[in-house]
Image: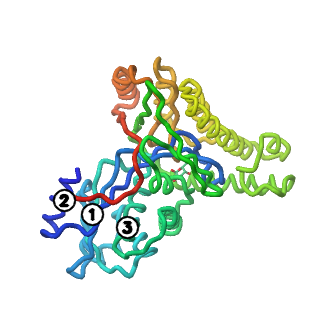
Amino acid sequence: MLNTLLDRWHLSFGSTAPEVVVRAPGRVNIIGEHTDYNEGWVLPGAMSRSIYLLVSRSKTGQHHWIAYDLDEEIQSTEEILEYGQYAWAKYIEGAIRLYAPELGPLHILIGGDLPVGAGISSSSALVCGILFALQHLNGKTESKESIALIGQRVEKEIIGVQGGIMDQFAIMMSQPHHVMLLDCRTREYKLVDADLPGCKWILINTRVKHALIDSDYNQRAAQCKQSVAIIQKSFPEVQALRDVTMDMLTAADLPEVLFRRSAFVVQEDDRVHQMVEALHHHDAQRAGALLKASHEGLRHMYEVSCDELDHLADFANAYKGVMGARMMGGGFGGCVICLISEDALEDFSIACVDAYLDRFGFEPEVIEFELSLGVDKVSTP
Ligand code: GLA
């Protein structure tokens, strides 16, 4: 892939090599969904699928940005100002404006094998990747953690999604074979070995992304805040749902919907810690049971699933050799993450694609991946 991108670079920008090449991976999350913006815990990692960003300062005095996979190109400031039609350019422009406006016009080529809209954070990969490349160009020396936080600001302030810090932290700081147990309040994290002998983590992409995902996401975040405000009347020490127990929830007398949303978050936080134990003890059965419970909660209590995700999770959870599966990420489309015994993988992939095709009329994508390193510079051949 990188060689193809380098060929394209030389075709568009001449013989000089890009000043910097960065690889930015997608994000998976083993468990801990919708807990990050409630100051709780998550267990994400970076995946082997990724975006490459090739970047140089422009010598022509003009911006020239290319999204290779989409075959889209922007060649002037005027076009960038009309970036509404190019979603990817909006992220890049936002990152430059917030972090490195002094750099002036840039040549940028992006491309890779990270599916867009699949709930594996291609947008955060793009933002973190471009920030890291800009940092190389402007010579600043902030930590990777600071870059992750700037990435979150780009998504909040420019794009308007009230996301937590899970995606950016996982994309910037992950290590191969590991996931990170991240405390989203203190931002402390520790690496956890996620390899389970005889098993594999895989994703199945529904290939759907239902509209309204951003507004539904923001609405869930708002409901969690409302719950905290009510709980505080009885328990003034509570700052976020992370501080709440099931007993407190019952005592707080919340409206039914808010109770369900909050109970999910409280239980999901607890499942993150249980999953760390399960991984530590190489207990694949227990890990699978936690995935199943998480999916049930996301479906019925937090209500962020959809037919396609439920179908895949149900199919996987009923399949011999699958330890457990659940929807992953914000919801309303995207991927299911599944823990499966290596022996069952081939047959399962065929059966799962067939069943999905039968029901919905198109194929899902089974994605095999490794847990990989976070954003990093790449030396070119
Ligand atoms: C999206 C957000 C994350 C997180 C998940 C849900 O991926 O970007 O911050 O809130 O949804 O766990």
Residue lying at 37% horizontally and 50% vertically, measured from the top left:
116
Label 2, residues with CA under 10 Å away: few <14, some 14-19, many ≥20: some
Q: What element carries label 3?
A: helix
* Residue kind at label 1, given as amino acid type: Leu
Q: Name the residue under label 1.
A: 54
Q: Distance between the residues labelled 2 and 1?
A: 8 Å
Task: Verify CB contact (< 8 Å) between mark 2 and mark 1.
Answer: yes
Nearer to us: label 3 or label 2: 2
Q: In this view, does 102 lie above or below 277?
A: below
Q: Nearer the viewer, residue 102 or 218?
A: 102
Quadrant in the rendering for residue 297 = top right
Q: Distance between the residues labelled 3 and 1?
A: 13 Å
Residue lying at 51% horizontally and 62% vertically, measured from the top left:
145
Q: Mark 3 points at which residue?
A: 92
* Residue kind at label 3, given as amino acid type: Ile
Going from the N terminus, do you reach mark 3 or mark 1 first?
1
- Asked if the beta carbon under badge 2 is closer than 8 A to the nearest atom of ligand 1, the reply is no
Left or right: residue 243 compared with residue 130: right
Q: Name the residue under label 2.
A: 6
Going from the N terminus, do you reach mark 2 or mark 1 first?
2
